[in-house]
Image (spheres, helix red, strand yellow):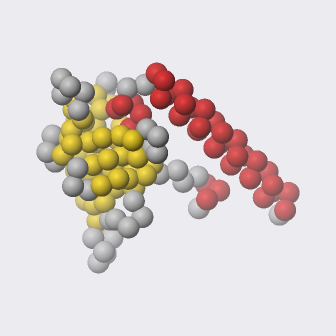
Amino acid sequence: MGRSKEILDLFESLIKTIRSMRGQYLLQTASTRELLCGEWERKDSTVSFRIYIEDGKYYIEFRYGNKINNYKKCLSSELLEDKEGNLYADFMNQGIGYDPKQDLLLVEDYGAFKRKMETEHEK
């Protein structure tokens, strides 16, 4: 088991290194909407977000649940950009931002969310 854990730890380290390199590359070449693609969560919240691209358009999925039975509801909308480059979700009438230094999704009225980085090894 010790050897297997060492191998898993090496793969985990490799994955983190590749993610870091990818992140640096994207910061130099990608649009803000491209950088936002992924799942976003906050530990103290039943709200989470997923941003994805489909047919050349970017979408934001707003997920929220309740603490009674963990039932999740999802709403999605196109992630739009105005002339000044500001992002917003039309259905929520919420401003959307990105903090590239901390890799945080910023959502008006909901706060900051971290990118979900779960791997099989962390489960």
Would residue 39 be seen by someone viewing this image from the given angle?
Answer: no
82 sits left or right of 44 in the view: left
In the image, residue 85 sits, relative to residue 72, either above or below, namely above
Q: Quadrant of the N terminus?
A: bottom right
Q: Position of residue 86 (x, y in %)?
A: 23, 32
53 lies above or below 7: above
The residue positioned farthest toward the right in the image shown: 3
Residue drawn 45% across the image and 43% down it: 103
Q: Is residue 93 above or below residue 48?
A: above
Residue drawn where x is 24% and y is 27% of the image: 85
Residue 88 seen from this side: yes
Left of 107 or right of it: where is 11? right
Q: Residue at x 43, y 25 (%)?
A: 30
Rendering coords of residue 24 (x, y %): 55, 31
Query: Which quadrant would residue 14 be assigned to in this image?
Result: top right
Q: 11 and 73: which one is in front?
A: 11
Across and down, in percent, residue 84 comes to 20, 25
Residue with the most extreme bottom position: 68
